Image (cartoon, helix red, strand yellow):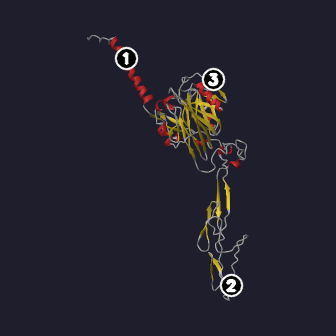
Amino acid sequence: MSSPKKPMRLALLIPLDILLIASCSLSFSYFHHVRPQSLENDPAKLQQAFIPDGNQYGNVTTAPLSADGTDITTLISGMTSKTTAANGETTTGGTTDSKDVTGEETTGDSKSKGTDTSAAGGDSHTQQGGTDAHTTASKVNGTTQSAGTSKTTRPSTTTTTTTTTQLQPDLNGWGYKWPDVFRLDNEVEITENSYRSHDVCINIETRNVGASVAYIADIYIRYIENFKSAFAQDTFGKNIVENQVAMAQRNNAILAVNGDYYGIRDTGVIVRNYTLFRNETKGELCGIYYDGTVTNYFKDGMDVETALQSGLYQTMTFGPYLIMDGVARTNIVSAVTEINPRTGFGYYEPGHYCFIVVDGRQDGYSVGMTLDEYTQLFAELGCVNAYNLDGGQSSEMIFNGNVYNRPYNGGRSTSDIFFIGER
C-alpha cells in the first residue's frame, strides 16, 4: 500500500492561486473591456421608435415678424430680375444689349442709329414709295442713300422689361419661427466661425470665462433630421473607437462634438436616429424627440417603451443633467464634479440648441470648469435643459472638418459623436 501524497506547501499554493486569479482577471478584462466587440447593428432587427402622425413642427400659418419686429419682406436678401427683349430672348439684369439694322451693337437703353423714332412709340418716319419708283432718301449711319423703290428701315424696337421676383421664406419645418435666420436660396455662407444655409445656421463664440476658454456653438436647424449622431467605424459595440475628425468628415458633419463614450460601458439606454441599440437603464438620461423637444430624466426615470412610442430620436447617457425644466442644478455630486475639460448640450426650444466645449488642464490658457460652473454658463445663456457629455481628453469641437478648440493632450478617439449636418 502506497503512502498518501503530501499536500502542496502553503507557501507555494498561495502564489499559484494569486497567479490563477490574475490570469482570469486579465482575460476577462481583455475580452470584456479591451477587445472591440461588434454588437447588433442592423436597424431591421432592432426596435424602432414610433413617429406620430401629423405635423411635428407645429401649426404653420404665416411667418411672424422678425426678431426686431419688422415685416419679414424687408429682410429678403436676394432677388432675380428678368429682361425680355423684342426677339423673345431673356437676359438677366437691367441692361439689354441689342443690334440695330446695320448690325452694329448698342448697349444700355435701346437705340437705333439712322432712324427717327418718336418718343412715344418708336414709329418710323421713313416714307414708303409706290410702284411709280419714287425715290426716297433714307439715312443709315448718317449716310444718305437712294433706292429705286422706297425702303423702310426698321428701327431697333428692343424693349427692356425688368421683373424683380423676391425670394420667399420657406415656412416648412421650423422655418416659420425664424424666417430671417435661414437663407432663402440654396447658397451657403461659411466663415471661420459661422455657417448659414437653407436649413442650418451656426455661430460659434469663443468666450473667456474666469480662467477658462469656452467655445459656444449657437445652433438653429429647420428639421430635426439636421441633428444627427454617428458611431465609430459606423459600428455599434464595445471598445470600438475612431478619431473624431475622421468620424465627422465621413458623415459630412458641419459641426460635431464628442458624444457620451457609450462604448466603455455595458449600461445606458442607447437610442440613435430612432433606433434602440441598448436598453439597460442606469443613471440620468437626456432624450431628444422627433418634435425637437428635449427632456432630462432622473436616474432610472425614463420608461423606455413609452419614450419610443412618443418618438424618441436620440439619447445621451453620460451625465449628469445640469438644468431640468429651467431649474439649474447646484452643488452637484458626481465622479466628474471637479475642474475638467467639458462638453455639453443645451436646449432652448425645438430647433434651437447649443453645444459648449470648455478646454482644460492647460495652465496659462484654460484650466477647465467644475460642473457647477459649467451649469451656470448654460443657465446664463438661457437654456431650459442642459446635459453633460463625456469630457476630459475627449472634449472636442469640430467645425467644417477641423478641430476648432484646443483639446487636452491633442484629444482622443471615442466611440461616438453628435453632429449637425444637412439632410
Q: Residue at x 68, y 79 (%)?
A: 126
Residue type beneath disc 3: Thr
Any part of residue 423 in sight: no
Residue 330 bears which disc, if any? 3
- How many discs appear? 3
Which residue is tagged 1? 17
Horizontal side, residue 367 vs residue 136: left or right: left
Labels 2, 3: front one: 2
Residue 82 bears which disc, if any? none
**Mark 3 to mark 1 CA distance (whole Å):** 48 Å
Question: In the image shown, does 208 or 48 lie closer to the viewer?
Answer: 208
Any part of residue 9 in sight: yes
Which residue is tagged 2? 129
Labels 3, 1: front one: 3
Question: In the image shown, does 39 or 136 lie closer to the viewer?
Answer: 136
Q: Residue at x 70, y 49 (%)?
A: 74
